[in-house]
Amino acid sequence: MQLLTQVTAVQKKSKNAGPRQTFPANKKIFSKAGIILFLAIILFFPSSSYQGAKKGLLLWFNTILPTLLPFIIISNLIIGLQLTRPLSKLLYPVFHTFFGVSRGGCYPVLMGFLSGIPVGAKSVADLVNKGSIDKEEGQYLLGFCNNASPMFIMSFIAITQLKRPGIRFELLFILYFTAVLSSFLYFYLFPKQSIHRKPTVSMMEYGQKPGLKSIIGVTPKFDFALLDSAIMDGFEVITKVGGDIILFSIPAQIISNIGPSDNYLKLLAIGILEITTGISQISHSTLDMNTKIAFITMITAFGGLSGLAQTKSVINNTRLSIAAYVKVKLLHMLIAFITAAFYVRFIMN
């Protein structure tokens, strides 16, 4: 009787486990099918694929590489030399009050707001890996520290594309304020996603993993080996970013060459794939200025699938959830669009 009960339990367990085992297999099938489909698209549209890849490469080389690489290298050096402690101590009173972060979480906020995607995500991932912040706070920070950079928003969007330098600070405020608001709403209003941090300074906030011997008071010294490591890591990250931009610029260019240029869905689809190309297409369309600003704000808040791929590449070695990040970004996109629409309708002259 006991043996029969054990066999029955095993059978039930096998039946329950059966359907779950199909999901990884289905995921692999979809991934392989997607790669084959992408290859077919390139073969069917060779001219557009070439144009898209060329534009993506030039965008990476002329804009992304000189803009982001120095930030990544400096960020690696700051973390390697444990300079995050004095910076966090200086910024903690302000950042804790406005964003509710711990002392260890202040540095990613600073780097994310200054440098943008994917440096904000990389700063969070590095500190999670080093134990300076826990996974829950890292997930919260990832939601609002990984946005388009201030220079991109004010210079490229407001001045170069929209030709409206007078709204550059308003656009920056809308995008950053709604980013913080979206992350706050997602993690604090949903019980399963809520995070709780103690107001006191813990060992984790000083960059020390629990259970390890205290290293407080011991500061690593600068040497060229550390510099070489920071540079090589920076080039690895920036190369991945370039690959993502080139790949996503191909379907964006193909969509751009198909059908009427001012179709709403077409413009949004291009922007969701790669925001730089999408912003350029929307800016040069015949849409009215209010619609242009609202659409551009929305796709910039999301960051595009290219930005999503860049973020995924820098958090791969952590336990941070890309699914939760996407949900926050979708919420950010919605709130930013509503805020921008209100701004252009009632406030902007």
Image (cartoon, rainbow, N blue to C red):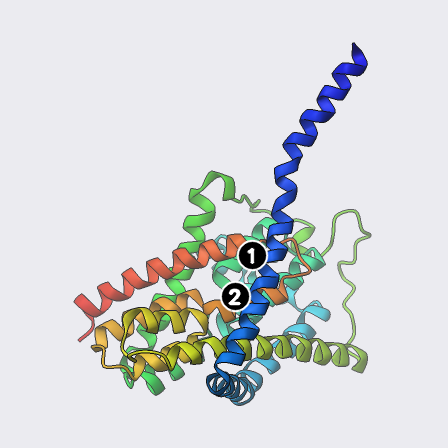
Q: Is residue 228 above or below residue 170?
A: below
Q: Is residue 282 above or below residue 14?
A: below
Callouts 1 and 2 close, C-beta under 8 Å: yes
Q: Identify the residue at horizontal 68%, vertical 76% (top origin).
A: 236
Q: Residues within 10 Å of mark 1 (few under 14, many from 20)?
A: some
Is residue 304 in view from this perspective?
yes
First reached walking from the N terminus: tag 1 or tag 2: 2
Q: Secondary structure at mark 2?
A: helix
Q: Image quarter for residue 181?
A: bottom left
Is residue 201 in view from this perspective?
no
- Is 326 positioned to the left or the right of 218 in the image? left
Question: What residue type is disc 2 on?
Answer: Leu
Q: Secondary structure at mark 1?
A: helix
Q: Pick whichever, 346 or 238, lies toward us.
A: 238
Which residue is disc 2 drawn over?
308
Task: State the image coordinates of residue 308 (x, y, percent, origin top left).
Answer: 52, 65
- Is 178 positioned to the left or the right of 121 in the image? left
Q: Is residue 20 above or below residue 260?
A: above
Question: What residue type is disc 1 on?
Answer: Ile
Q: Image quarter for residue 273?
A: bottom left
Q: Identify the residue at horizontal 33%, vertical 58% (top origin).
A: 335
Which residue is disc 1 drawn over?
322
Q: Identify the residue at horizontal 69%, vertical 28% (top origin).
A: 13
Task: State the image coordinates of residue 284 (x, y, percent, origin top left).
Answer: 30, 84
Q: Pick whichever, 281 or 291, lies toward us.
A: 281
Point out the image quarter for the C terminus: bottom left
Q: Identify the residue at horizontal 57%, vertical 58% (top origin).
A: 30
